[in-house]
Image (cartoon, rainbow, N blue to C red):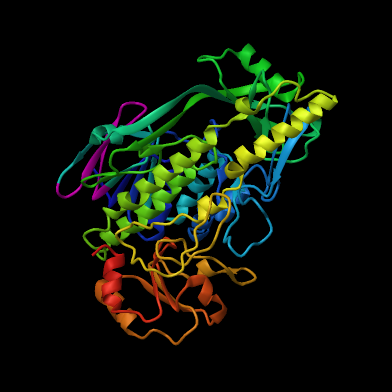
Amino acid sequence: MTETEVVIAGGGLVGLTLAHELGSRGIGCVLVEPRTEAGNGSPRCKQINPRSMEIFRRLGVAADIRDNARLPFGWADSAVFCASLTGHRIERFDGIFGLTDVRRDELAEPAQWCGQNRVEEALRATLARRPTVEARWGRSVTRVEQDAGGVTAETVDEHGRRELVRGRYLVGADGGRGVVRGELGIRLSGETHAVRNVQAVFHAPGLTEAHPHGRAVQYWVVNPEVSGLMGPLDTEGAWWAIIIGAPEDPDPAWVERALHTMIGREHPVDVRLLDPWTARMLVADRYREGRCFLAGDAAHLNPPWGGFGANTGIGDAVDLGWKLAAELRGWAGAGLLDSYEAERRPMAERTIAEAAANMRVLTGELARPGLDDDSDEGAQARLKAAELIRQAKANETYTLGFVLGARYAGSPLIAADDGPAPVSSTSVYRPSGAPGSRLPHFWQARDRSLYDALGPGFTLLEIATDPAGAAWEEAAAARGIPFTRHHLHRPDLLELYGARYVLVRPDHHIAWRGDTPPDPGTLLDHARGA
């Protein structure tokens, strides 16, 4: 029997992020993962969005992820729609997904294009910085039992050797087919899309130089015969392609023909991996059962269109991580752990709705005869298709409003007010100081983010007035809450934040704002679920 504070079942992106979050707060945890290496599997997630990257900045691993990416930071921030990879271009979107390498005030960290396995490699390698985290690679959780004092997980290695790990809490981050959710008797509800797809990972030296469209992270192939999208995984000839509407069990010859159709000619391809999948829109009926929680794909499954899936799971890990740490260190209120589902389940539902909306129009729906013809009719067909693409796919590629504008408006931890509350659309981010929102970011100096000044617990930002008084420190100390005060001296920011004082949670979301703070103890109690 190994004893710890938190058992994490699953060491993918979500489990690793949770291990870093807990480890950064000195929480003991054991991470159990059957894969001994991150490997070269199918990288379903390729876009680490700006919200996830600023989380990784706070955890001190953003640079490690960028260094391990096979496409350098700033390599491309475009998506191209074309009749084939070597054929006519139909439309091009630049500046997508927040992939810019130009500093912007609203971004603490831009997005990074990086295969999921490479991100996992970086997160595994940096676990050595977390002395309270122990990883058990090559072991799977097979059974879960909980009682009033904790949770015991039975783990088994590839040779059938059993080991028990007991923690005060357990988090199932072991995916949609994982063991934990089944052990807890929690169902996923929703629907599955009827269309089958397959992702192919292949090697095609010289393909980047063989097409006329310039650098891009995605090439959407709008073709009546075979449709889908593709893009480079590195600068050395590794590519991925999603073929939409694939047969149930595609043979190698079919896959090669499909890839040649998407490329537009018989460029040599060496298919290394096939990953069949269907889009699923499912959410767990509940996120908690006693001392056990679900996160990531174990709690929700959504279509990949827009790149929200893994990033939503990373958000789960952060929300749950600081709350578990508060509970284990004695400063959580009785309702804090229950607020995890109250905040993250609606977020999953919104994400699934957004991705499903993107899925309504894919390349097959955009395809028209003659798109690759060298004729006036072909040119006219491309103009009409480009108009449809702009209408249907802009929200899928310009996503900063959805990613950064997310707000825990109905959370029981948030002190709502009737102050200014700009609302973001999917593609347009409008910074908001309204309680529940992500704290609007700006750069305080050349290389100093506002987020770098925030503490590990709650932070009181004094925007442009006298200090709020020592009662804040006294109230926080009486409750054991980690507390930081940061004075900005920035009257020009009063309109942005909507108040003189802003109370920021450990996850950078705003708990409260106001010009004349009420009793600090009452506010802190509300924000910690008491």
Magenta segment boundaries in residue numbering: 148-169
Image quadrant in which you'd find residue 256: top right
Q: Quadrant of the N terminus?
A: top left
- Expressed as whole percent of the image width and height from the top left, the position of residue 377 reads 81, 25
Question: Which is the main secondary structure of the residues drawn in magenta?
Answer: strand
Residue 160 covered by magenta stretch? yes
For the point 37% across and 49% down, the residue is 344
In the image: residue 518, left or right of residue 245? left
In the image shown, does 250 or 271 lie closer to the viewer?
250
- Expressed as whole percent of the image width and height from the top left, the position of residue 510 reads 41, 65
For the point 23% across and 47% down, the residue is 291
Q: Quadrant of the C terminus?
A: bottom left
The single residue placed furthest to the right in the displayed view is: 375
Decide: is 469 above or below 165.
below
The single residue placed furthest to the left in the displayed view is: 148
In the image: residue 514, left or right of residue 358? left
- Expressed as whole percent of the image width and height from the top left, the position of residue 60 reads 51, 59
For the point 61% across and 52% down, the residue is 98
Q: How many marks?
A: 0
In the image shown, does 188 or 445 lie closer to the viewer?
188
Q: Is residue 81 visible?
A: no
- Expressed as whole percent of the image width and height from the top left, the position of residue 524 reads 30, 71
Residue 279 covered by magenta stretch? no
Decide: is 530 above or below 269.
below
Image quadrant in which you'd find residue 319: bottom left
Q: Is residue 92 visible?
A: yes
